[in-house]
Amino acid sequence: MLILLINNPFDYITLIVSYDTIMKPPYSITSSILSLLTSISEKLGVIKASHLQAPRAELRKENRIKTIQSTLEIEGNTLSIEQVTALINNKRVLAPQKDIVEVNNAIAVYDELHRYKFTSMSSFLKAHAILMKGLVRHPGKFRTTGAGIVAGSKLAHLAPKASMVKALMNDLFSYLKNDKDPLLIKSCVFHYELEFIHPFEDGNGRMGRLWQSVILKDLNPIFAFLPVERIIKEEQLAYYKALEMSDKSGNSTPFIEFALTAIDKALAEQLSERRTLISNIDRLQIFREQVGKNEFSRKDYLDYFKEISEPTASRDLKTGVDEKLLKRKGNKRTTLYCFIK
């Protein structure tokens, strides 16, 4: 099923097609989109070459807090970074109960991010059930009534009829699963189309931003912790404008340009921060995830971190031994290391 906007942005017609045919959501590739895809790909290449795709635990936690606080502030949640941090650390917070529930739900759903399969409707609905538990009547279920978005006193967007939602979402997940578009494009298209369909009574914006991260983590693990939501919060008016422009044009091109710009900016910030912050302990923790309990030599370490010198590798390994992260055996060229449990 495909919805096409006509002259009045709040009117729409429905074209019924065979469900054997997968309808591809409409958009165009612009020069801006091509430039952004190139820029993002280059940054991901640097991240991979520098072994930055697996942030240390402290940075993962810091970015997760930024993500949760930002995605909820967009929806009117009043909790600060400090209050979200306190809730993650199981401390009491004085705030409206609804806001606390929203944060605790978001903590729970983002903790499960690695388990979600981006092409799975059941994963998607399970995530909504966790995210909106205690906040809506039917978490994890598509709406059964009409829906729209009101801006001030005006209707900004009229969503498709409730009877159309399941078929539209089936088509959207078929696009995710079967189309050959790059994941970067798919993630943006999905985000916009989800907001257009508005499949839930509430939580659509949160789900759009969450599921874009779920899609992108299959492209690079850094997207599981990249706080793109913070960039969107900072550019909130532009975010809504991009959604509105896509509604009026009947395709997701304006929103793709906005979303790719936000991703590119978030990656640039992470690269800038982590180039200055990465330390020998960071490298050791990254390498630990690669080798596990296996023994390794300095040569193995250098083969993995090709950008560092032999003296730097020796200093890293000495630090690991001194900090009781590593056990060492043998002498000189026969020296082997293994991580302590």
Image (cartoon, rainbow, N blue to C red):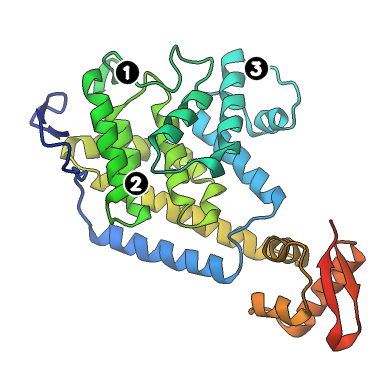
Q: Alpha-carbon distance for marks 3 and 2?
A: 33 Å
Q: Earlier in the sequence, mark 1 or mark 3?
A: 3
From the viewer's perspective, is residue 1 above or below residue 184?
A: above
Residue 102: give x, y in percent of width and height: 56, 23
Residue 326: give x, y in percent of width and height: 86, 66
Residue 300, by quadrant, is bottom right
Which residue in the protein does label 2 denote? 188
Q: Inspect the image, locate mark 1, and give the three-letter code of the amino acid beneath it.
A: Gly
How many neighbours does mark 3 have within 10 angstroms: few (below 14), some (14-19), or many (20 or more)?
few
Secondary structure type for disc 1:
loop
From the viewer's perspective, is residue 284 above or below residue 94?
A: below
Q: Tell me the residue at 25%/43% (across/down).
A: 252
Q: Earlier in the sequence, mark 3 or mark 2?
A: 3
Which residue in the protein does label 1 denote? 152
Which residue in the protein does label 3 denote? 95
In the depicted view, which residue is nearer to us: 263 or 310?
A: 310
**Which of label 3 and label 2 is nearer to you?**
2
